[in-house]
Amino acid sequence: MTVMDDWVTAACAELGLDPAQVPVPVVLDLAKEVAHQVLRPGAPVTAYLLGLAVGRGADPADAAARLGALAGTWPVELGADRPDDTPA
């Protein structure tokens, strides 16, 4: 087991969730794409939004793909080349 596996298992136990239902690679890939294409603080917020969508019945892989596609088309002038704390 990795530290990530240990963390996910412990966090799931705390929240009453099944760790087998946590698509860690999907979430990490999405967070990386948002952090690089949009802005770093957008990564954890997007992961939260993904969790909300999944909690409401969305397929995790589909929702992550849709958000990843959105991040991939995010205009550069609105995203990654601007410092994280600069207002839009």
Image: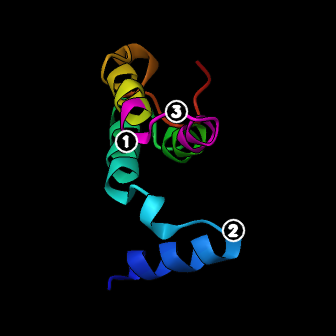
The label nearer to you, 2 versus 1, is 2
> In the structure shown, which secondary structural element does the residue marked by tag 1 occupy?
helix
Q: Is residue 41 left or right of residue 65?
A: right
- The residue pinned by badge 2 equals 15
Q: Amino acid at mark 3?
A: Ala
- The residue pinned by badge 3 equals 58
Where residue 31 sits, quadrant-wise, is top left
Q: Is residue 34 left or right of residue 15?
A: left
The answer to whether the residues at label 2 and label 3 have Cβ atoms under 8 Å apart is: no
> In the structure shown, which secondary structural element does the residue marked by tag 3 occupy?
loop
Q: Is residue 49 magenta?
A: no
Q: Residues within 10 Å of mark 1 (few under 14, many from 20)?
A: many
Main SS type for the magenta part?
helix
Residue 77: horizontal and vertical position, in percent? Answer: 40, 15
Q: Earlier in the sequence, mark 3 or mark 1?
A: 1
**Image point 38% across, 18% down: which residue?**
74
Q: CA distance from mark 3 to mark 1?
A: 15 Å
Residue 60: horizontal and vertical position, in percent? Answer: 44, 40
Q: Is residue 60 magenta?
A: yes
Magenta highlight range? 50-62
Where residue 61 sits, quadrant-wise, is top left
